[in-house]
Amino acid sequence: MTGTASTDAAPGRAPFLTVDDLEVRIEAGGGGGLAVAGVSFALYPGEILALVGESGCGKSMTALAVMRLLPSPPARITRGTIRIEGTDVLGLGRRDLEDLRGRRIGMIFQEPMTSLNPVLSIGRQMSEGLRRHLRLGRAAVLARAEAALHDVGIVDPRRVMQQFPHQLSGGMRQRVMIAAALSLEPGVLIADEPTTALDVTVQAQVLDLLAGLRDQHGSGVLLITHDLGVVAETADRVAVMYAGHIVEAAPVAVALQAPAHPYTQGLIACHLEVTPTARPVGTVPPLLETIPGVVPPLHARPDGCPFRDRCRRAIDRCAQEMPPLASVGSNHAVACWKPFHD
Amino acid sequence: MLGAIARRLAASAATLIAVIILAGLLIHIVPGDPVTAMMAQSVTATPEVMAEMRRHLGLDLPVWQQVGLYLFHVVQGDLGLTIRGNEPVLTLLIQRLPNTFMLAVSGLGVALAIGLPLGFVAALNRNGLGDSVVMLIAVLGVSIPSFWLGLVLLQVFSLDLGWLPVAGSGWRNMILPALTLGVTYSALVARMTRSTVIEILGEDYVRTARARGLREWQVLSIHVLRPALINIVTVVGLVFAYLMGGQVIIENVFSWNGIGRLAIQAMLQRDYPLIQGFIIVFASSVVLVSVVLDILYRILDPRLSRP
């Protein structure tokens, strides 16, 4: 794979996180297959890289693999390397892995409702990571936890720390989860659909938090989402995943305005544009496009390009060989035999 | 929280009054006449004597009066006298209750000491070798009859090795019955712990705790154990309430003077006041346990105590 080289944003700097040729297999009694089929990318300090795709494309599996939090069984990493600031994550023993998690790479999850322990106070869940990793005294831990909650826009951290998850709204819980992850100042933050379960107004605030993390702390953020609106608003670079492969990687402006892969273009065409000036009053709105078909299930992924059955541009070669991720411009790579060109 | 507990206690009192009324009706529900049963072996049992006896026991009054009187006496702490021996029922029961309580507590302690770690081990090695071994032990624990296990333990530790006394009422006498009880119930505790822990291990918040970099023992002892306690406490409470009804077989095997032996004796002798007293004491301990469980739930689960 040439993916890492061709998707680098700034080859001069050392990446926080590099994933090279990662393969995750899911065993399911004969019906298993590759959930992640040779994914490579690099995440640099001070950037937000969006991993985009429909559900089942392998983006969450990739994120969990980086954290070594894959549910195993049935999922298993069968190939590839993952490095965080030079450390080979797949070679780590349990205790070293525990030292790495939280401190050097943090993760926030999709479901704020279920991702906090219902029987432990917010204060407890905010402070346990600080106590564990930074070995601070009680007062210092509380002060930092309060500061972290304040930073994510919680006005009365002291009161919130005494509350329990069920007493908070979804948006507040997501803030708490983000604050708990950020208080440890990890170099890399993985955010798995951090806004999917939230109201639109809260979504924007959460995305601002992630952008702030990038701008103020220089952290790298791996943002996993299916929402191109979120990508347009926040991300610096985009990697589009389909059926376990990265099919296109590009700076956000390029990916959204001049996508080269038919799948990326399809995703953009499906995306509902809500701009009030777009349509004169009284005219009929254009029909929203859809990509016909679904992501092929794990056990029935065909040879060649997995998107070809849903692709209008498919040619014979697509059925024979999976196209490699190849450069088509500055920082722009695509895995397609018949990409769009400007 | 206090208001909720007060409401709970009021409901418990109502339950107990219902139980007392049912216990009072008992004599009239079961077939057979207690006076006939009492006088069965007596040569002086002329019809006159038996009628006098009935009058003396109040059995000649209308049923509702008898039950009302019974309730009236019981709420004042008077459970009547036993038919055989004319001893106060309450005194007899109170003499036996501590023995049953100690046996229940120590048996449950053994069950938890064995069952909790086994359940955890099985859950953490789900479908692995450890799991199979633990579940095999659990099946054995359930299948072995407690009287047989008790007899084997007595034979080995009291008769062959001579380490422990065969009969008596000191703490050394409690070791074997507690062990027997504990082994039997450890299987239940292990199974329940296993399924609870497996369920919690799959929760998102456990993944969050791991993502935070906590040590695995911290994840297990805090993020898994704390929520698991809610289920564990439920099972422990129910088993405890059940054990407070006395363990007839184990008490007999080990000549342990608990409630169970007394109850069996009372039943065989048709000693109705004593049976009624036993029912009320048993019901009271069930009610008490459920109140304690309610309080524990509120301590363990903030979703109940802090809405």
Image: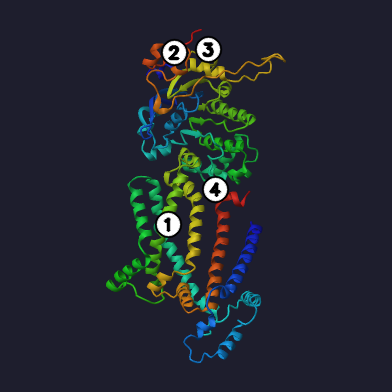
Mark 1 lies on residue: B188
Q: How many labels does the image show?
A: 4
Task: Please say if the residues under marks 2 and 1 sit with CB atoms less than 8 Å apart.
Answer: no
Amino acid residing under circle 3: Ala
Task: Give the left or right position of residue A214, taking residue B191 as reference.
Answer: right
Residue drawn at (54%, 40%), measured in percent from left and top? A114
Helix, strand or loop under label 3: loop
Circle 2 residue:
A314
Query: Disc 4 to disc 2, how far (Cα)?
Result: 53 Å
Circle 2 — which element? loop
Tag shown at residue A119: 4
Disc 4/disc 1 C-alpha distance (Å): 25 Å
Nearest to the eye among marks 3 and 2: give it: 2
The residue drawn where x is 42% and y is 35% is: A70
In the structure shown, which secondary structural element does the residue marked by tag 4 occupy? loop
Residue closest to the far top:
A342
Q: Quick one: label 3 or label 4, which is nearer the N terminus? A: 4
The alpha-carbon separation of the residues under discs 1 and 3 comes to 63 Å
Q: Name the residue under label 3.
A: A258
